[in-house]
Image (cartoon, grey):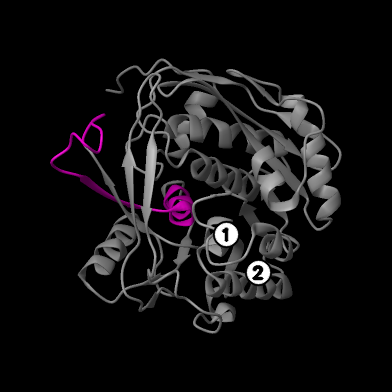
Amino acid sequence: MKKVVTFGEIMMRLSPPEFLRFSQTNSFDVIYGGGESNVAVSLANFGIPTEFVTRLPDNDIGQCALMELRKRNVGTTHIARGGERLGIYFLETGAVSRGSKVVYDRAHSGMSSIKSGMIDWEEVFDGAGWFHWTGITPALSQGAADACLEAIQVANQIGVPVSTDLNYRAKLWNYGKQPGEVMPQLVEGCDVILGNEEDAEKHFDIHPGSVDVTQGDTVDSQAYRSVCEQLMERFPRAQKIITTLRGSISASHNTWSGVLYNGKDFLEAPQYDITHIVDRVGGGDSFMAGLIYGLLTFDGGDQKALDFAVAASCLKHTIYGDANQVTVDEVEKLMSGDGSGRVSR
């Protein structure tokens, strides 16, 4: 099978143990992760060849991130070295009625100082069957946005399908450009788009109309159809528009599903009730990885690909850390209706 290439920033995540607040902790647990690297790790667990492209500082901390990727069987051949530091983010994990908090410390990172021309994209895409990026990357800097556009254009030229997770992050767009000035040109080159109503509004001024898509912990899946149709009209190259559906009962208890619009059918996956969340960070990344896996391996089955993505990301909520660590067999077991969690002996 051809490899999947992802492009973005991997960071060091520092979290207080258990559910301690920042002000309570005397130590932090260290994990490495980021949107696009999380997708690569998930796909590697599913047996898909992957290649993660980024820029890491040429120091011991950058080397630690590199070793983590290699440990997860992710390709690192085309990672550039340079820049001042590895980006960091601090995560305080919420519980019940207290939401989680994220504090970024990623200015002047190796990835934020990347520029077009640093990566030989024709070499990167040799033997590639898919390219994935997220809206986090162009939010880092003009150089990162330029490098991302360069990658998309090369992928388009040689016929490699392109997917994106729009991933609006308000705290990151601070280098003088607004999302609406940058994202449309990038998304024009995408075949598969994942995003919710906030992503569509903040990036493209697209609204779901008069319908309230979320009412408390209830999510109206049909309300997303308008957003999907508007995105496909705005970006005619796109063949599939997908949205995850999260109902937040509390920080520890969510419902989870997803919808897919392919220009003809509006498909909806089963809904899962996740009653004891271990770690919800990376839920969207695990969904995207599951979707890419399904689209690459299930013959013409949009519904099965969507169902696989939702089940895979449901299981991610039981995994500590940014990246999903489940197998295809475990996902298919949940898809078959077996969510018992019985011990496998």
In percent of width and height, residue 147 lies at 57, 74
Left or right of 4 on screen, residue 14: left
Left or right of 80 on screen, residue 262: right
In percent of width and height, residue 27 lies at 15, 43
Whether residue 261 is visible, yes or no, is: yes
Is residue 13 covered in magenta? no
Rendered image: mark on residue 163: none
The C terminus - image quarter: top left
* Amino acid type assigned to the residue bearing label 2 in the image: Ile
Q: Residues within 10 Å of mark 1 (few under 14, many from 20)?
A: many
Left or right of 155 on screen, residue 16: left
Q: Is 137 above or below relative to 108?
A: above
| Front residue of 267 and 164 | 164
User: Helix, strand or loop at disc 2?
Assistant: helix
Image quadrant in which you'd find residue 67: bottom left
Residue that badge 1 annotates:
133
Q: Which residue is drawn at 79% across and 33% down?
A: 225
Q: How far apart are marks 1 and 2 (CA)?
A: 9 Å
